[in-house]
Image: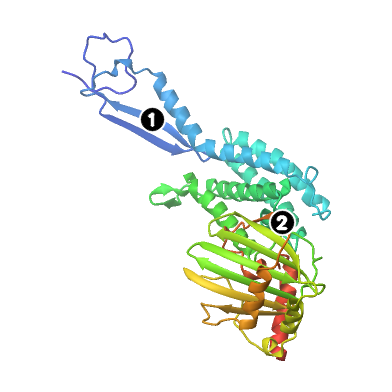
Amino acid sequence: MLHSFSGAISATEPRNKRAPRLTKLRLKESRTQAGSMVPHKVVIDGRNCPGASGVQPGMDTSWEARLLVTPKLAPAMLFLFTAASIAWACPERIPSPFGPVGTPPIEIAAEASPLAFLCACVLVFFRPRSGYGLGLAAGLAALPWFVRTELSLAPWNSWIFLNREGGFPAFVKLNILSVALIAIAVSCSSLRLLPARWSLRGAPLYRRTWPAFAVGFLVLAVWFVRSVAPYSIPAFDHGREAELRILHVQKRGLHFYQTTVMEYRDGQVWVVRSKRRLFQYRFDGRIIHTALGETPLLERAHTLVQSPELRKLHTPPARALRWWNAEGWYVVLKDSRLLAFTSEYRTAPPQEVADLFHEIEKLPAREPWPVAMRDICLGFCYDPVAALGFTVLQQRARLLSRSASNAGAGF
């Protein structure tokens, strides 16, 4: 008759003897002062346990080590990656293109934070509460410098640099990555320092890791939404004012086919054609240069710009097309009056606008050259105002302000 026993099973039992079956393993855990779960006692009931002769006393030690180390690996790796990201983006390595971004205390704190994160990475294995507290302090110390860096870019921001064709500065990617990692590290450290009695769905909240990543994602999402709209690129306000701009957009499902005609006072005309679709980051276009010269089209263009009937028109705001199939015409007079005619508004452009547009399209032109555009919103932020050429934030604000004033004045 097999008797129950507790403790480890001796490895010296005869192999031909049927070993008892391990039917019950109870692991009692007690919260240590450092906030980790430590195996306290192992009770083994040995009734009907085949194959237990290979169990060694050292198995208890391996289980204890795994239970101690595993919950701390994720915070330790997070602190390590955060330290590396901040070290690469520290003020001395990649300064702001607009000059100093903080006072000496802020810069000193940012430069010291990678070392603090590295110390926290080691401390979590020996003194967990001290390690998590140091990680929390390091994140809060580094964050002000990144906030100052972002504010120093105004009216630009880190996200709209991703709309820039031809690459973007390395500090932009490092800023975004570092802020995300800092937010996750601060959230993770705060969770680990919560009281043990706080629980979520029956599990101690301080042992959870996914809420920290959820907080980091939420911070990035809010920052992204507030930064990317309206569409703009990081450029200076040095553009020429056009006499007339006409944009024709056809939407077919997810695809947009758009052509922009820009006519200047000297008769020079630029035609930009592009095809893009939603959920597409980069899209290509072609630019064509031609001239009206002394043709009747030049006189017709100037007459259209001075048309009192066109200036007195009041149209809804120029917005991106949302219907599955839609068409839109957008006209800008002297970069100060914006008119919108779309199938969604059930309005059509004046016939002279459409006729002039099609006749300019037929003019002989030089060899077109390609151009590429990007939209970090995957096509959802690139609206008609941007397609008309107002991709610099100051130009866009000036156009909308002038158009609202002229519409209110009746011309």
Count the numbered circles shown.
2
State the scheme by which the image is colored.
Answer: rainbow
For label 1, the residue is 41
Quadrant of the image occupied by residue 371: bottom right
Chain-order first, disc 2 or disc 1: 1
> Which one is in front in this view, the residue at disc 2 or the one at disc 1?
2
Given the image, on which type of amino acid does mark 1 rest? Lys
Secondary structure beneath dot 1 equals strand
Can you give x and y, in whole percent of width and height, for residue 211 in the image? 50, 51
Quadrant of the image occupied by residue 327: bottom right
Given the image, on which type of amino acid does mark 2 rest? Glu
For label 2, the residue is 367
Secondary structure beneath dot 2 equals loop
Residue at point 34% right, 18% down?
Answer: 55
Image height of 47 relative to 242, above or below: above
Residue at point 48% right, 34% down?
Answer: 70
Can you give x and y, in whole percent of width and height, for residue 145 in the image? 74, 52
